[in-house]
Amino acid sequence: MIELRSDPYVLKPRVAPPTESDFRIHLNIGWCRGVLFNVVALKNSVAIVEYDAILWSEDSIMFVEYKDSVAAYKSLSARRIQQMGSLAKNIAKGLGYKRYCFIVVVKDLQEMTARGGVDVIPLYMLGSYEPAFSSTYSEIDYIDKLVAKYSREEKLDFVKELEKLKNMIETGLV
């Protein structure tokens, strides 16, 4: 049995429910180098979150939560979705990934939406879904917000300096 460690987290596979076969058929794996299905993340030997799939490439990782009905999705609170997204970011950073994505996939959902700041997509759209990765480093996200703000204010010299700083940080993370 494979086990991934990212202190203080340990990722372990769990038994796959038979209701996830549709999910696996629709999953777009063309962009990634590997996939783990049905993973439980433990912190200090206590299960804190489960992901139905984790996909990764050289520098990016995507966590997926699958719900096999709209009712099951509706019972999932926005707060829990936010927690799962935050844990995904922490795990991704601990594993050394620069970028991460967390999405919720729902069977029989009619259109793409968002909940708890996370993309929620219908199962039928999963095959063509292009992950919208975010940085695992909050500092880079903050610099991006500052660049956008000062670009709107047309303070281009300051924007140039911020972009240099961002590049220095990203280069140091390689």
Image: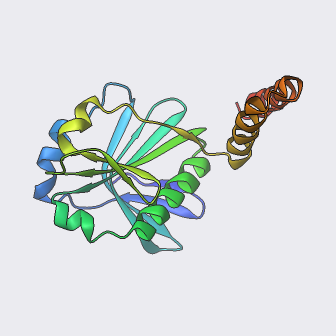
* Residue pictured at 46% horizontal, 36% vertical: 132
**The C terminus: image quadrant:** top right
**How did the renderer colour the structure?**
rainbow
User: Which residue is more in the foreground, 130 or 160?
Assistant: 160
Residue that extends furthest to the front in the rendered view of this protein: 153
Quarter occupied by residue 99: top right
Q: Is residue 10 left or right of residue 22?
A: right
Q: Is residue 11 above or below residue 33?
A: below
Q: Position of residue 145 (x, y in %)?
A: 70, 41
* Residue pictured at 74% horizontal, 46% vertical: 139
**The N terminus: image quadrant:** bottom left
User: Which residue is more in the foreground, 65 or 120?
Assistant: 120
Q: Is residue 83 above or below residue 19?
A: below
Q: Position of residue 82 (x, y in %)?
A: 48, 62
User: Which residue is more in the foreground, 158 or 139?
Assistant: 158
Q: Is residue 164 left or right of residue 15?
A: right
Q: Position of residue 168 (x, y in %)?
A: 82, 29
Quarter occupied by residue 47: bottom left
How many numbered markers are drawn?
0
Q: Position of residue 108 (x, y in %)?
A: 13, 51
Q: Is residue 83 left or right of residue 105?
A: right
* Residue pictured at 53% horizontal, 59% vertical: 86
* Residue pictured at 58% horizontal, 56% vertical: 90
